[in-house]
C-alpha cells in the first residue's frame, strides 16, 4: 500500500471511500487472525508435551480433548480470517472496477485498460486504481 500522507487529496478521498467499505471485514479478519495463532500454538505445544513427555496419559484424557478443541477452534478462526481476506480483495476489486467504469472524465480506452488490469491482477487492484486516478486527474486538468 501507499503511505497516505504522500498521496494527493483526490486519491486519499477515493481510498478513504474504499476503506469505509472494507473496514468491518478488516476488523473481523484481524481479530480472528489475532486469536487463531496463539490458540493453535498453545494447543500444539501442550498436546506434544502431554503425548510425548508425560508417561501417565490415562488421567489426562480431558486435558487432551480440551487442547484438541482449542487447536480446532484456532484453525477454524484462521480459516475464517482467510475467508474474510478473500472477501476484502473481492470487495476492493469490485469497488475499483465500478469506480473506473463510472468515470465521466476518463476516455473509454483508459477505462477498458485499467478495468482489464484489475481483473487480470486483483492483488494489485489498489496500485492500478491509483494509477487510474492519476491518469483521470491528468485528463481532467487537460480538459479543464
Image (cartoon, helix red, strand yellow):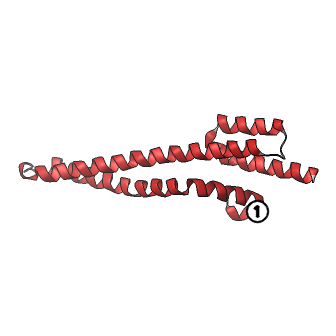
**Percent x, y of residue 122:** 62, 40
Q: Is residue 6 above or below residue 93?
A: below
Q: Is residue 97 above or below residue 142?
A: above
Q: Residue furthest right?
A: 143
Which of the two residues, 132 or 55, is positioned nearer the viewer here? 132
Q: Quadrant of the N terminus?
A: bottom right
Q: Is residue 104 above or below residue 108?
A: below
**Percent x, y of residue 121:** 64, 37
Name the residue at 77% across, 36% down: 113
Residue ID for mark 1 = 9
> Is residue 75 toward the left or the right of residue 17 in the image?
left
Q: Quadrant of residue 125?
A: top right
Q: Quadrant of the C terminus?
A: bottom right
Res 24 seen here: yes
Q: Residues within 10 Å of mark 1 (few under 14, many from 20)?
A: few
Name the residue at 24% across, 49% down: 69
**Percent x, y of residue 51:** 16, 47
> Is residue 105 toward the left or the right of residue 115 in the image?
right
**Percent x, y of residue 59:** 6, 52
Which of the two residues, 46 or 23, is positioned nearer the viewer here? 23
Amino acid at each position: 500500500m501507499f503511505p497516505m500522507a504522500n498521496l494527493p487529496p483526490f486519491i486519499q478521498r477515493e481510498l478513504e471511500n474504499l476503506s469505509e467499505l472494507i473496514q468491518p471485514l478488516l476488523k473481523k479478519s484481524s481479530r480472528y487472525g489475532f486469536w487463531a495463532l496463539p490458540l493453535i500454538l498453545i494447543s500444539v505445544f501442550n498436546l506434544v508435551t502431554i503425548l510425548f513427555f508425560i508417561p501417565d496419559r490415562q488421567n489426562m484424557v480431558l486435558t487432551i480433548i480440551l487442547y484438541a478443541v482449542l487447536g480446532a477452534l484456532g484453525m477454524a478462526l484462521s480459516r475464517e480470517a482467510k475467508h474474510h481476506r478473500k472477501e476484502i480483495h473481492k470487495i476492493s476489486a469490485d469497488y475499483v472496477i465500478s469506480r473506473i467504469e463510472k468515470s465521466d472524465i476518463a476516455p473509454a480506452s483508459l477505462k477498458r485498460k485499467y478495468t482489464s488490469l484489475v481483473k487480470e491482477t486483483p492483488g494489485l487492484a489498489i496500485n492500478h486504481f491509483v494509477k487510474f486516478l492519476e491518469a483521470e486527474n491528468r485528463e481532467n486538468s487537460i480538459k479543464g
